[in-house]
Image (tube, helix red, strand yellow):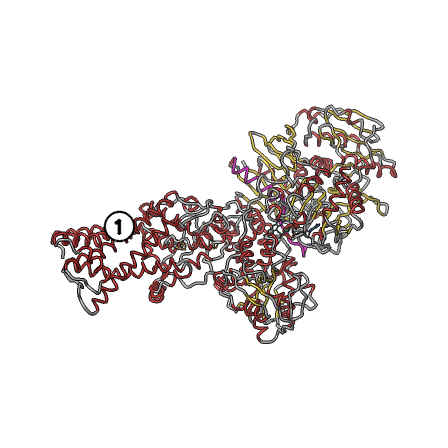
Amino acid sequence: MLTTPERIAFLLLALASLLLTLRGVRLIVRAIGRGYGRPSWGVFLRRVIPVSLDILLQRPIFRTRPLVSLLHAGVFFAFVFYGLVNVLDLLEGFNGYSTLHASGVASAYNLVADLLSVAALLGMLGLLLRRFGLRPFRFNRAVFLLPSVRFGISRDSAIVGGFILLHVGSRWAGQAVRIAESGRPDWSQPTASLLARLLGGLDAATLAVASHATWWLALGLILVFLPYFPYSKHIHLFMAPLNLILREEKPLGRLEPPVGNGQLGSARLEELRWYQILDAYACIMCNRCQDVCPAHGTGRALSPAALEINKRYYLNRNLNRFAGGTTSPPLLETATSRAAVWSCTTCGACVRICPVGNRPMLDLIDLRRSLVFAGDELDPNLQAALESLSRYGNSFGKPARQRARWARDLPFPVKDARKEPVEYLWFVGDFASFDPRMQENTKTVAQLFHQAGVDFGILYEDEWNSGNDVRRVGEEGLFELLAEHNLAVLGKARFRAIVTTDPHSYNALRNEYSALGLDVPVYHYTEVLAELLERGQLRPSKRLQAVATYHDPCYLGRYNRITAAPRRVIRALGLELREMPRHGENTYCCGAGGGQIWMDSGGQERPSEQRIREAIALGEDVRFFVVACPKDMAMYSDAVKTTGYEQRLTVIDVARLVAWATGLIELEREAAPVSE
Amino acid sequence: MTLAVILKQVPDVVEELAIDPSGTDLDRDSVSYVVNEFDEHALEEALLLREATGEDVVVVGVDTTGELDQALYTALAKGAQRAVKLVGDVEGSWLSTRALAGLLAPVIRELSPRLVLTGVQAPDDLDGQLAPTLGALLDWPHTGVVVGTELADGLVRVRKELWGGIMLDLELATPAVLGIQAARATPRYVPVGRVRQAMRESTIEEVEVETPVESAPKLSRLRAPEAAGRAEMLTGSPSDVVERILEILRARGLY
Amino acid sequence: MAERILVLAEQLEGQLTDVTLELIGVARRLAAPRGSTVDALVLGEGVSALAATVPADRTLLMEHPALRLFNPEAAQRALEAVARETSPWLVLVPNTSLGMDVAAAVATRLGWPLVAYCQAIEERDGQLVATSQLFGGKILADCPVGTDHAVISVLAGAFSSEAAAPEPPARIERLAPPAELDGLRVRAVGLERPEAADVDITRAEKIVAVGRGIESKENLELAEELAEGLGAVVAASRPLVDAGWLPRSRQVGKSGLKVKPRLYLALGISGAPEHLEGMRDAELIIAVNTDPKAPIFDVAHYGVVADLFEVAEALQERLGG
Ligand SMILES: Cc1cc2nc3c(=O)[nH]c(=O)nc-3n(C[C@H](O)[C@H](O)[C@H](O)COP(=O)(O)OP(=O)(O)OC[C@H]3O[C@@H](n4cnc5c(N)ncnc54)[C@H](O)[C@@H]3O)c2cc1C
Ligand code: SF4
Ligand code: SF4
């Protein structure tokens, strides 16, 4: 029981603390409110319960790092429970209600509190050790960091870690003191009782002082800490769940149009959308996103984590002014660099991995939009590609009329879907249409469809680039132009479904075009091939006795979760499939996405080369590196050469394997595999 | 003061070009048009000059394609201040350089710019390049193959490329006409959004012009050159092959 | 009628350019059957020695300080005055950086027809026909040339320069410069020659390009030697640059530089589309590759299916020996 002066002191302190904290929170809310758009309450109501459950189960964080996640779970469960503990302790301080030596539910509560205290103390020590002892916190040297970040992160960790240790430690010690005061161990609090035995020799007066002191250390500390809370990364306690709850269930592959009136894109913090500012508050600075980022992994200047952290530290330092509405400096001075913005492959790995639902990639795309719109100098190759796209509808600088040239070499005519109805409208894609290496493959797909009796047609020169990567490069107007054209042409053609050979087109057609009014089923060719094989419309006459690994394209595997169909095809051919560590939705980017295929990455090892090494590490007997994306074919047939593994590993499109198994082609070009 | 940039749309040589049955023109129905790539450089150079001196940039063109608006709006979106379109009964026709210069000269004189910039040449200027032709008609100093400009009081300093990297520095009293080979920077990219914005927000001035009497270049026939085809294979021992290679080099004055 | 053909001789710092001899060769060929005479106009200052090597029937020499360096206005005035004076039925001007400034302006001022980008002049059915390259060389235009004044600007390298070797002309006539040369609005300030030190492959006339067929960095030396022997520079496909064997400034292709040399000798380059993008416009492409199906042979003018080392060594022997 507290003395009356103590009570008054506590209440006054609580009032001051709450007022200060509230002010901080209000500033944050105002800061977030400066972003474009508003959260939807409908979404909140729909998601609050399921997402809260997810969070209680700690599902979002268990995607990687099992050990660290376990430690986090310890701290988290302790924290939730400690909410209750603190309330009861408060009661005890004010009216003497105590669960000491109680029985029944109260003793169960005691036991949990006792054990959790120790778990939390150990967990916290472990996390602090990791942060300060092992120092896993690293950025590439080229990554832009605000000067305050380097020191700030450690200080924040130290403050919060220290607070938790002190808070939990005092509470635990306080219980021990009270047990000691009572003169006998409380068996529902075994660890505190153990500690109490050490205190046995102390006299009653000392114990009384200690009881008050520990109470104040445990609960008063909260009041001191509370105003700091909005500036600490531990505000993620509230912001992360909020972020997860308010996140609309939109496909990752559907971008929102750029914000801004006339000035397209986001160059400054306040030009982002509200949830992109919230991201900075939700971020727990765990660097998981950086670990999976192919750009960071190949030594480039991009770290999605650094982006969020910089945003947050900028806000921390300038919260008053920012919340008050002053124009902030460009993000390229406070959050990231041009080089970083242009190294994103839009692979989406950062978005998928982030435990708190952040989407750093969107910031990068919005930054690109603003750079493009402002006429910032572009990579010359990117510029050439964009110019070609707006002139010819393809990035190859080739006349549109040459798009279907590959079809001329086929022994049968390919239907013109603009002129006659077809079942499948085949959206071929730029690379598959124009790249001479890929045309062979495209012909193979056509022959397979033909062999299987599929009724298909193409749009000839009226198919333009889908604009998927154009949009991600930030050239929204060109995307619109391409999409408008394609939608108009598709609108006039008669077909049941679209099939495409290109995952990037797949994403655009399925996620972007559907938002613009396209309402037809879209399939990837591997889905169609799998079905044709399973229905017996394609009959393998040979079995491929070899080990293969399969690379999931980002825009297929991660963005659209098409991971089973290509594997069904590979297995149907008799191949043994051996997975790379990063596969399915966790696939690793080939480095070509987001317009990177048009830019010069310059010098360092490429993601595609790392990927080839990943495949090589699967064993000597892996013979095929199977791809299902024309861009992958370009990237990996190059990477397998530059890494010097072309003798060991054959990069091959899944369709070529099918065609070989059905006797349609010989694999002389790719070196014949062992067959039965 | 202003800088006038003359833009001309020409058949895109990336596309397959077909010859009209008359044999004296391309099949204009199958042609697609682009702005002469050197004119793009002329515009870029003008915009760079504008950035340095604050001149207004006026783009001028004769609409022979019915599609010139697109090119003019693009130029406005890139940063030009005005666009002037010469219209008349010239759509679909192949204007000779002299006819083109004849149409442009009075309009340019009226604009009284400090400089006229246009592409050093065009894929279809059979009767000579526009800059010297227009320069002669206006009786203004002119030069072509320009790769750099700098405006000074009453004159323009230009860098003209000769060959093998040799540069000639000239000073021309203004007003002058320049044929630009390459701007100091790659012609800038203009996002489609900006072009659309220009289409909404700016207007193109139109000037009615008389159709010239003899407007097409004089020629008797167009034809395709003989196809080059695949490489001619040189066979034999290494020394035979080397002998043949040296012969080929010698014939071309390369050895 | 059919009296004179006037050739504008092109000189830079007292050096006659090759194209001048090419033009005089054509002029002579056209003059002979018509009984015309060939006049060559030499413009400059202190170039009388040079005038004495121009192999025309009559070399017209005009000297003036404004003509020392090339000055487009001065040259145009001079040619215009001479053309008015001598009234040739045909004026031949090189379609070079210098000639381009002059030809169209003089033709316009005289009101004479002009045929530019001419690569061939032939007699067809009693009619003289000049053939021009248009539309990036994709189309040729045949243009009738009358005998009543015409100007033709001729592409450098289109005709053989062997038809006319430097030799003293039959006659040298000194012409007084027209008065306009004293009141010019164009001033030539100076010439700048490229520094020899830094290699700019986009400007190189000859390129020896190597690809992965070269196998190792050490073997690059062979390419360097070969390049030296040929007066060429070494360029490479991307993998070699990636490997750090050569600086990025030597990379040809999509992500490298686009080159357009007069000779591109491709050794051990497969001809990936990204590579072809950067070099397919070279005037002469000779490819050496062990693989007869290598796509480089689709764009090359001459191909050799052989080991590049054998060919390079044999070539080196001939060049060095
Ligand atoms: C987005 C992107 C951009 C790219 N940009 C470029 C670029 O700008 N420039 C570029 O060059 N590449 C670029 N590439 C790479 C390109 O795809 C090819 O990988 C590369 O051009 C191949 O180089 P190469 O011809 O030297 O090697 P290879 O393709 O490996 O060819 C080597 C050739 O040498 C021949 N050979 C081997 N030994 C010998 C011998 N002893 N004698 C004769 N011949 C021999 C072989 O038959 C083979 O044809 C790019 C790739 C991508 C995906
Ligand atoms: S989308 Fe991919 S490349 Fe871009 S920041 Fe995220 S992880 Fe990195
Ligand atoms: S953005 Fe997400 S994954 Fe990246 S550091 Fe922040 S919390 Fe971690």
Residue C51 lies in quadrant: top right
Q: In the rendered structure, does residue A209 fall within the stretch colored magenta? A: no
Q: Is residue B15 above or below residue C314?
A: below
Check the residue under mark 1 and report the chain it is in.
A
Please indicate whether residue C64 sits to the left or right of residue A653 in the image.
right
* Rendering coords of residue C4 (x, y %): 83, 34
In terms of secondary structure, what is the magenta stretch mainly?
helix
| In front of the other: A155 or B191 | A155
Q: Quadrant of ligand 3?
A: bottom left
The one of C92 and B66 positioned closer to us in this rendering: C92
Would you name the residue on which mark 1 appears? A227
Q: Tell me the SS state at disc 1.
A: helix
Between residue A561 and residue B93, name the one nearer to us. Answer: A561
Which image quarter is the C terminus of chain A in? bottom right
**Which residue is pictured at 18% across the width and 68% down the height?**
A103
Residue C305 location (% of width, % of height)? 75, 52
Residue at x-position 70% and y-position 27%: C67
Residue A375 seen in render: yes
Residue B255: percent from the left, percent from the top? 76, 39
Task: Point out the stretch of residues depicted in magenta.
Answer: B28-52
